[in-house]
């Protein structure tokens, strides 16, 4: 009998949890098992002594390809779509907060962008209601129910703490998973909203520059993109 048939090392796998992930090999969202392996010395195929761990892997239930746990850092296509949708929604609100809410053309452009991003039932009233809530939370102006579209440009100007928090939370995680061209398109979506009623207001320009920084775009690159958008408008 050959020695290799008498003893060897076998890895046994224990499933710790499961879920859905983006499988690079399948190219789409798939179910996975996260499994931890233990190496054991076997004699006549009977496992005896532990020989250390084989680490943790993520195994696709469709193609059975195994990956390191870091593969779970990549969002599923469903999650990525939600991240992109939320990013456009936040940018639209930020531009309106910077002063664009006073013009109907800007409000309509914001609603169109948010609908195209995935909030198909978004309305102008909903966006204005959110802006009113932001103003009320910031304590900048009079009660939100006293605010109408004509007074929003003045009322929402300068809500800096909200912008800083929301833009960072919505855009920075997304930037890690977007190619440079994708990050540019997200910024230009905000530029189109801001330019719907004419040249950038100073506060709108500041907001768009903050958007670009949150998307990890270089300052010079941001400036070129915004100038090109203004020229083409």
Image: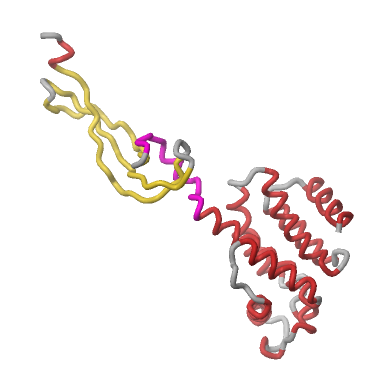
Q: Which of these two is toward me, 172 or 19?
A: 19
Q: Where is residue 51 in the image (x, y as percent from the top left)?
A: 23, 27
Give how far across and how far down residue 113 sits, in percent: 69, 64
What range of the chain is rendered magenta? Answer: 63-78
Q: Which of 82 and 45 is in front in this view?
A: 82
Which residue occupies 25% across, 36% down? 13
Q: Residue at x 29, y 46 (%)?
A: 16
- Residue 105 found in image quarter: bottom right
**Image location (x, y in percent) of residue 167:** 65, 61
Q: In this view, does 28 lie to the left or right of 186?
A: left
Q: Quadrant of the C terminus?
A: bottom right
Which residue is drawn at the image coordinates 37% and 47% (left, top)?
31
Q: State whether residue 132 is above or below residue 96.
A: below
Q: What colouring style does the render use?
A: secondary structure
Compared with 220, 118 (above or below) is: below
Is 58 magenta? The answer is: no
Query: Which residue is painted at 81% across and 76% down in the image?
Result: 103
Q: Quadrant of the N terminus?
A: top left
The magenta stretch spans residue 72: yes
**Residue 224, placed above or below residue 45:** below
Image check: 125 left or right of 83? right
Residue 64: quadrant of the picture? top left
Nearest the viewer among 20 and 204 is 20
């Amino acid at each position: 009998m050959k020695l290799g048939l008498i003893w060897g090392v076998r890895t046994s796998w224990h499933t710790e949890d499961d879920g859905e992930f983006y499988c690079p090999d399948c190219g789409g969202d798939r179910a996975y098992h996260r499994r931890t392996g233990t190496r054991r010395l076997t004699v006549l195929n009977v496992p005896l002594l532990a020989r250390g761990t084989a680490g943790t892997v993520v195994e696709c239930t469709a193609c059975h390809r195994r990956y390191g746990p870091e593969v779970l850092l990549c969002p599923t296509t469903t999650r990525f779509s939600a991240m992109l949708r939320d990013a456009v929604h936040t940018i639209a609100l930020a531009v309106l907060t910077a002063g664009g809410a006073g013009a109907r053309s800007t409000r309509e452009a914001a609603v169109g962008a948010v609908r195209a991003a995935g909030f198909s039932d978004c309305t102008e009233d909903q966006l204005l209601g959110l802006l009113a809530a932001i103003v009320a939370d910031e304590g900048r102006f009079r009660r939100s129910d006293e605010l109408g579209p004509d007074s929003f440009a003045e009322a929402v100007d300068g809500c800096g703490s909200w912008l800083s928090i929301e833009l960072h939370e919505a855009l920075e995680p997304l930037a890690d998973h977007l190619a440079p061209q994708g990050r540019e398109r997200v910024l230009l979506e905000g530029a189109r909203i801001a330019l719907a009623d004419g040249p950038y207001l100073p506060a709108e320009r500041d907001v768009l520059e903050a958007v670009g920084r949150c998307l990890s775009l270089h300052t010079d690159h941001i400036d070129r993109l915004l100038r090109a958008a203004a020229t083409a408008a």
